[in-house]
Image (cartoon, rainbow, N blue to C red):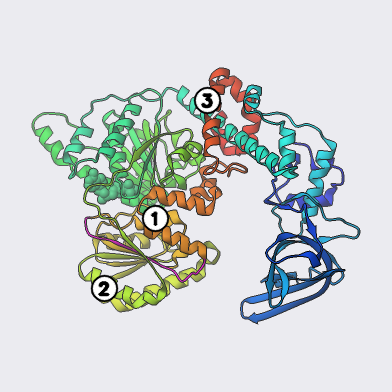
Amino acid sequence: MDESLLTIKGVGPGRVKQLNKLGITDVSSLLTYFPRTYEDRSVSYLIGALKQGAVGATKGTVLNIQEKKPRRGLSILEIYIGDATGRLKVVLFNQGYKKNFYKVGQRLHVYGKVEFAYGSLQMNTPHIEILREGQVAEAGIVPVYPLVDGVSQFVIRHAISNWFAANDSLPELLPTDITKEHNFMTRYEAFKEMHNPLTVERYGLARKQLAYEELFIMQAGLLLLREREQAELGIKMQPNGDLVPAFLKALPFALTGDQQKAFNEIAADMEDERPMRRLLQGDVGSGKTVVGALSLLKAVENGYQGALMAPTEILAQQHYEGLTELMAGLKPLAQAATEQGQTAGLGQVKMALLTGSTKPAERQVIYEGLADGTIDIVIGTHALIQDSVTFKKLALVIIDEQHRFGVEQRATLQRKGHHPHMLVMTATPIPRTMTLSIYGDLEVSLIKEMPPGRKPVLTYAVDSTYKERLHRFFEKEMTAGHQVYVVCPLVEESEKLDLVAAEQLYEELAEKYHNKFGVGLVHGRMSAADKEAIMDAYYKGTIKLLVSTTVIEVGVNVPNATIMCVEGAERFGLSQLHQLRGRVGRGSTQSYCILVSDSHSEDSKQRLAVMTSTQDGFVVAEQDLLLRGSGQLFGLAQSGLPDLRIANILKDIDLLIAARQDAKDWLAKLGFDEAVKLMKPELLRRFGESFQRILYS
Ligand code: ADP
Ligand code: MG
């Protein structure tokens, strides 16, 4: 499968160049370059026989091409084709650049829906192929591949059919008994069906089989990964320390049942000699930080160090402040204990904050403190995984908002200790079954229950005609002493323009309200120090209205904030909107989330409707997946595993469960070494470098 493309008949250096544009570099990547969709051209109509409403194929000669521009921003390209029986108008919208692409006299094959408009039949944006001299359009079920400019369907179809013509087998991947049990066809047949389906039924079977294969390999890899990590001896902690109970006693609130349960699970893991690999999942505001603090203290009371890594500086800063405040409760207890001649050390927990903007001198002190063990807990950003950071006895690594980090970054921090325990915390409420596929190497603890007294955030979708009313609402809440977030989207392609928009909005609001309430602006291009100063003023309440680009998306905790207003809400993903909404409703006062959007697209309306109809992060996540497709799954790509090419995590959940069970049985039967030997090449091929380094380093 690693053979060069040049071994295929009809593929020379020129074709190779074109295929390369699609990321196709060898036979294997050619065969796994699956069609985007298929067209059933079993019936091709003469133009005169086309009927309104039918979906089908026809062909004809280009008679005339016209471009129309009825209004600014709209261009319509009309291509008239004809055969002996009639004429058909083919309409393309906003594709004026194709004007010179089609020429009078060319023969076109078109496939699409026949519509009736302005007294004649037409096809809007059909699929078009230019037929060469003497070329006959393919019939039957025809694959349609995703393309880029300068590469035609013909090039890829031709390469693929020539490969199949010259070969009659492919190496099998799955263990024979599994293939038998599931009644699978050969891999050769399955791939052939994917590219050139004989029937819809056979295609369905082939897709299912290859999806299963993909999931089996992924699960086998994740299971091997877990087995390998757990084969190592980690650090066994003692059950009864003094810091954890003292901290709980000093805490101004009682843990919720779910928080207690999660910590019990974590404690049990840490008391085991196998390193913990646990995911702590809980909706925004469910109180994960306290559970993280308890886990860190457990490491400290056992004489070890702990590290917490967060994705942004603001978040790291806030964790640091939050933990300092939580730990402050330990101090008086420590004093009392010392006076009574009990445990010294209590309340002496030493914490440090390490981020990209920590000053060099201070940074040096922290490096030394971590290396000689005088610092017990460090909180930071990516700065923690720099080479210069070393620990004396790191026993626990906590990673917050895991989806922001890759598998590899997670591993780098782990390597700074001797098989330390690892806890990853995420507010992304991934449906339970789905965690299997992404976090297949982790156990899961779930915080479902919110701290008592929380009121659901009232969510409204409005358009920008509501501006004045909104401003009056902001004013009312701020007069009552509450705080407001206004978020503007920052989309990378036009960062500058978006920034201008955010600044304008800020100026408008500042002019109205700054003197009375204090208005601030934070955005991604500010220096860390400036950002921090503004955020600080917002925490303290001297700024009551904060205009921001999405930098506050994760983790920020200002319980006094009661309004989250999101401008251009259609430009955010559902899970992002849910995160943003989670910034309010953190105290006992009624809070509001207002989604402002002028978009009329069906898709945005649907997404905003999800937000206004549910508070449940799991429902939001599921809807998000359904609307967007699993490829986009919360930065699945960033999690270090590539997107699934065939399987769909939502729709193929049954296959996933079956594949996981089969992979487990297979691994148990074969043993680790043999299994690695068999799966290694395919794991490398599909999961790439980052997976390799973890599994085999
Ligand atoms: P998240 O899970 O989003 O990280 P946090 O840990 O920031 O949530 O907690 C949100 C807020 O709830 C914080 O102000 C925290 O002090 C508070 N909190 C956490 N647990 C409880 C509890 N059991 N009872 C009352 N308030 C709690
Ligand atoms: Mg948090």
Whether ligand 1 has any atom under 8 Å from the Cβ at mark 1 is answered as no
- State the residue position of label 2: 475
Between discs 1 and 3, the one toward the N terminus:
1
Residue at horizontal 36%, vertical 63%?
A: 530
- Magenta segment main secondary structure: loop
Left/right placement of residue 454 relative to residue 25 reads: left
Q: CA distance from mark 1 to mark 2?
A: 24 Å
Counting from the top left corner in percent of width and height, residue 483 is at 27, 65
Residue 183 in the image: state x and y as whole percent: 66, 28
**On screen, residue 551 above or below 26:** below
- Quadrant holding the C terminus: top right
Q: Quadrant of residue 337?
A: top left
Task: Using the image as rendered, state which of residue 664 and residue 28 is in the foreground.
Answer: 664
Evaluate if marks 1 and 3 touch, with contact meaning CB atoms under 8 Å apart: no
- Amino acid carrying mark 2 in the image: Glu
State which region is magenta: 588-601
- Residue corresponding to mark 1: 578
The residue where tag 3 is placed is 664
Query: Of the residues shown, which amino acid type is indicated by label 1?
Result: His
